[in-house]
Amino acid sequence: MACIPYKLPTCFAKLYCASLQQKCLERACCWSPVDEANVPWCFFSKNHGYSVVSESQPDSTREFSLNLESKKLQIFFPLHRVNANTSIMACNVLFVFQITDANQARFEVPHEHVQAPSSPPTGPLKYRLELIQKPFGLKVWRTSPEKLLFDTTIGPLVFADQYLQLSAKLPSHNIYGLGEHVHQTFRHDTNWRTWPIFTRDSFPNGGTHNLYGHYPYFTCLENESGQSFGVFLMNSNAMEVTIQPAPAITYRTIGGVLDFYILVGDTPEAVVDEFTQLIGRPFIPPYWSLGFQLSRWDYGSLDEVKKVVERNRQIGIPYDVQYTDIDYMEDKKIFTYDMEKFKELPQFADYMHGNGQKYIVILDPAVSTGKRLNGPYEALDRGHAAKVWVTEPDGNTPLIGEVWPGETVFPDYTNQACVDWWVDEISRFHKEVKHDALWIDMNEVANFVQGSSKGCAENKLNYPPFTPRILDNLIYSKTLCMDAKHKWGNHYDVHSLYGYSMVLATEKASREVFKTNRSMVFTRSSFPGVGKYAGHWLGDNAANWNDIKWAIPGMLEFNLFGVPYIGADICGFFDDSPEELCRRWMQVGAFYPFSRNHNAQGYKDQDPAAYGADSLLVKTSKHYLNIRYTLLPYLYTLFYKAHVNGETVLRPMMHEFYSDSKTWGVHNQFLWGAHLLITPVLDPGVENVEAYIPDAIWYDFEKEERITDRKEKVNLNLPADKLGLHLRGGAILPAQRPDVTTTYSRCHPMRLIIALDDSNAASGELFWDDGENKNVPYTGLNSKNARMSDVLLLNLELELGKNYTVNWQDKYRNSRHFDCHPEAGSDQAKCEARGCIWEPSNVPNEPWCYYPDTHGYITSNVVETASGITVDLERNTAFPSQRSQSRDISKLRVEITYLSGKSLRWKIFDPSNARYEVPVPLDLPAMPETEENNRLYRVQINNKPFGIQVIRKDTQEIIWDSAVPGLTFSDQLLEISTLLPSNYVYGFGETEHPIYKHDLNYHKYGLFTKDQPPGYKLNSYGVHPFYMGLEKSKYAHGVLLLNSNAMGEQTTHSLTQLVLNALDGLLVSTGLVGSLFMNKNKEDTFKMIIIIWFCSGQELPAHPCSLAWMRAGRAAITPQGKQNRTT
């Protein structure tokens, strides 16, 4: 651990190095120069620190008295005697220890919510404490399984009046949190990185400097079990935190006490739950605040604001809230408005309300000392009379600084008289200018002069013996002098609590103004516990590709901090926003919990309509905002769960998939809750994005199709108007038809979006109230154990004030059951003798005997080449042979050939014995297609059971999926099944079908030439084992099985099953269907043109290929229903 906590420069001057070495040795530390960057040259020896001289254990606490062990240790004049107290909270997961001066009271954070332990635990603890006597140290162990979580013996305790240091070794490098900074990745780099923490008005431009919030809190994921813990140091003084490769963490703060809270959880989400119990659960925002919002600094006039409102209304963009920044004020004075440029501002809220929209105003803390244009500044005068200002060290004279309006004074929100004044002023202003919520800014607290208009005195507060690595290395830079006085204490101690205390005062004003209506407060500066009352945005970013990236780790961190109502300025605050950047930002910003487009004075307009009503930006913005508004019931439910259970809203992937180490460092994707995965485009000129798909069933949300990828990196094709959006299997999401505002959306019926998981089940929850009133009872919908088709939409009418439980079961709940006993005479004994499952069903024709999920063959060897894939298979011998008179073939080979860009063939055969192949010559391409980019498809192999999946690249639809149980290959019975991409299947013959499109409700058809008249399900004159399937997109495909033996084909609700006497090759080809669905015109037309290449590799050896084409005519349907046909 560093004894001289400075980043050492290269020693160009030997004298300088010698001086550092001398200083190091004077501190009784060790000196060892190294070449590695950031590694300290001066570090502590093992015998530094304190030793325990006494111990007592009253109730649930343990108290230690510590003496300084090394008298030589002279780092910033350490105290020679300190006390350490440890407490155990009743929740059994929270360990508290505090180290303070044994002889003199020191500043402690007067937190509104955090309470001292009140009772002993009632059950077993999840941790145990080990005390090291000499030198003093604490080890916090997890009890099951036993693991050392927090070990302070790695470095000595240093406790001086203005320098406190404690280090701890951690169990893993998976460290998240600490703030507020720009962290370019979500998981911390542990290679000697130091992060200062001290609230500061600065730009989030990617440096390591301190920003608006003060969060000495981190979480640590221990391993793949998901077990995690959090560490919160409740200290508001300026500090820095160093993370080193041990892995270990070192805290250095310049005041207060060391007041640590260690939270032990079974999962990362459980730690967030425990932390928000400690500091206060997040508030539930009003429903309307989840809509899209527009703002900018300096519209210039109210007329210009209305132009922006109107042009965005006209293009139909979903849009709920309009802001005005400080330009609405008279000379930037709070509690005023410009009576010339904004003369109709008192009526503006009504103008917005008339269209179901809301209006938010900004308030800064600093109050101008000047007069108003036409008289006294009454808010200032009332403040003077109530003595509400932060003062100079004399405790009486208001400290003078400078902010936007010029010379200013600063409210002391830790003073009850100031809180009363603030509530009164906001109430007065609301009566003059109606608004719906408050946006508070500049509350770090910001000051445009250094300290005060008089400067700052040279004393130990303004110039402490040690300054953490804060911006400018000057503690009063761009803020107040540290010796300024507040009711809570010196500014030195309470600086980082300024925004927190302002939030508390503003929330009280909000309750006074809005009564039972739910409003909100929105703050730039924050401290743990702010999320109980307010939201936050990530500050004054810029219109560049770095800032769109870095917003994601920032939002993920604030969800850890208990502030889930979080967002970044969409399209960037500073600089002109190019169309591509703003378009991509609007796409991802549609999924920020707080979704607001905001930009700065002097830059081009960047509201969506400013780019043109017909622009691609407007088109894609409307599209994804409509999806947001569709899913607002789900998002609102997530906020309710955050409020009740402390859950994250914008969730890191590793919180859900912690057993997969590949998720631990993901920071360019995020989840809404547990179920919606968002993958944005974050780089210019990019339409293919590498994304990680975690281990679950996922559905393309927009296409309503299941994807095959899981637990792997994929390359998503995301053209200019798209981002990645995937729904996790097992989810039931409440949804609602969107409209241009949440007011209108809430008038529409609701529905459920259901996606099944690996167990063909799904569940979900809904929280519902009127969205605004604090006292209206809510409606809850709890949907569990749904078994349905892959994605189903169900319309529901919900009535406020009632509870609903919805239970249902799909008619075709067993649609993935594959018949294990297709011949007659099936019974339970025969079924189970085959190793299959017997389950009677009342669904007509549904098989009662079906294969277990792992039945079939197992992949033993896969060889991929440019022209195809070869696979060796072995029969899964866990299951008995199906038929004694037809010998199973235990070892098979599969050959897959990429015939062309539109066709492929695979053949399954016995590599040891030749079998009959159809001797029909096919016109196959002379050479296979070896260029991957030229192929419209890609192929995946499933291992257990073996299966082939063919995926169309541009839509990601699976057009063939035989990764299902039941593959059988014996001498005289071969069976293969596939899932279908849609219910639209045509072909198979020659048999009589009553309709052209197949009925998929468990029908069987024989295929074997016979001289018999056509009849329902009777095999007739020809054999055509070919079908065409339509896909959910604009495409179609065809599949031919080149086999001349007697066979049968069975169709079910979600699959087709082929039961064959011989299996040759299968050929899949892709074709285009144009204008597949009816157009919404008075004269609707239907046109389908299909050009299909199909080949087969029959038998197990191979086959040729033939070209067929279908040219469909155009059918025009007139309004009268008459049909005109052309060929």
Image: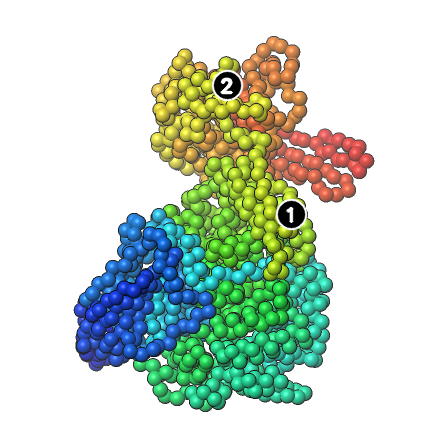
What is the crowding at mark 1: few (fewer than 14 residues within 10 Å), some, or many (at least 20)? Answer: some
Residue 1113 in view here: yes
Residue in the image at 42% along x and 80% along y:
489
Residue under label 2: 822
Residue 44 vertical position relative to residue 784 in the rendered view, above or below: below
Q: Amino acid at mark 2?
A: Pro
Which element type, helix, strand or loop, lies under badge 2? loop
808 in relation to 510, above or below: above
Secondary structure, mark 1, is: loop
Is residue 899 in sight in this rendering? no
Residue at screen point 59% across, 69% down: 510
- Image coordinates of residue 920 in percent, x first then y, are 51, 19
- Viewer-nearest residue: 645 or 57: 57
* Circle nearer the viewer, 1 or 2: 1
Name the N-terminal-most of marks 1 and 2. Answer: 1
Using the image, determine if residue 377 lies above or below residue 988.
below
Examine the image and state in which quarter residue 1034 appears. top right
Q: Is residue 151 left or right of residue 683?
A: left
Find the residue positioned furthest to the top: 1011
Count of numbered tags = 2
Residue at x-position 57% and y-position 13%: 1009
**Does residue 1104 sit above or below 361 in this rendering?**
above
Kind of residue at disc 1: Leu
* Image marks 1 and 2: residues in contact by CB distance under 8 Å: no
| Residue 745 coordinates in the image, percent (x, y) | 66, 53
Between residue 456 and residue 501, name the one nearer to us: 501
Q: Position of residue 944 (x, y in %)?
A: 40, 32
Q: CA distance from mark 1 to mark 2?
A: 45 Å
Image quarter (top left, top right, bottom left or bottom right) of the C terminus: top right
User: In this view of the protein, which residue sits in the foreground, 53 or 411?
Assistant: 53
